[in-house]
Amino acid sequence: MEKTDLSTARRMLKSTNIKTKKRGLRVIKAVKKQTVRVK
């Protein structure tokens, strides 16, 4: 099971692997979506 917290996702974006970058982007978008709902 992979970590899905924001700091890990930001670290994933620096990776050279395309799949890893996309995975990181997906996590960041999901977190942003959640924070918009909270406000």
Image (cartoon, helix red, strand yellow):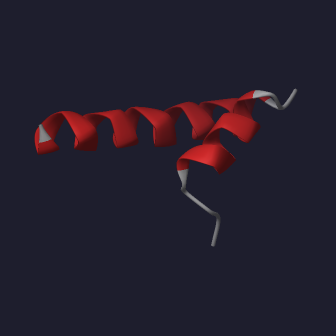
Residue found at the very far bottom of the displayed protein: 1
Rendering coords of residue 8 (x, y %): 67, 49
At 48% from the left and 36% from the top, the residue drawn is: 28
**In-front residue for pair 37/18:** 37
Residue 20 percent location from the top left of the image: 72, 39
Q: Residue at x 69, y 31 (%)?
A: 21
Q: Quick check: 21 left or right of 30?
A: right
Image coords of residue 26 (percent x, y):
48, 36
Where is residue 13, by image quadrant?
top right
Q: So how many labels did they put on this image?
A: 0
Quadrant of the rendering where the N terminus is positioned: bottom right
Q: Is residue 17 left or right of residue 24?
A: right
Q: 22 left or right of 19?
A: left
Identified at 61% across, 38% down, the residue is 24
1 left or right of 28 in image? right
Q: Residue at x 14, y 44 (%)?
A: 38
- Dividing the picture into quadrants, the one containing residue 39 is top left
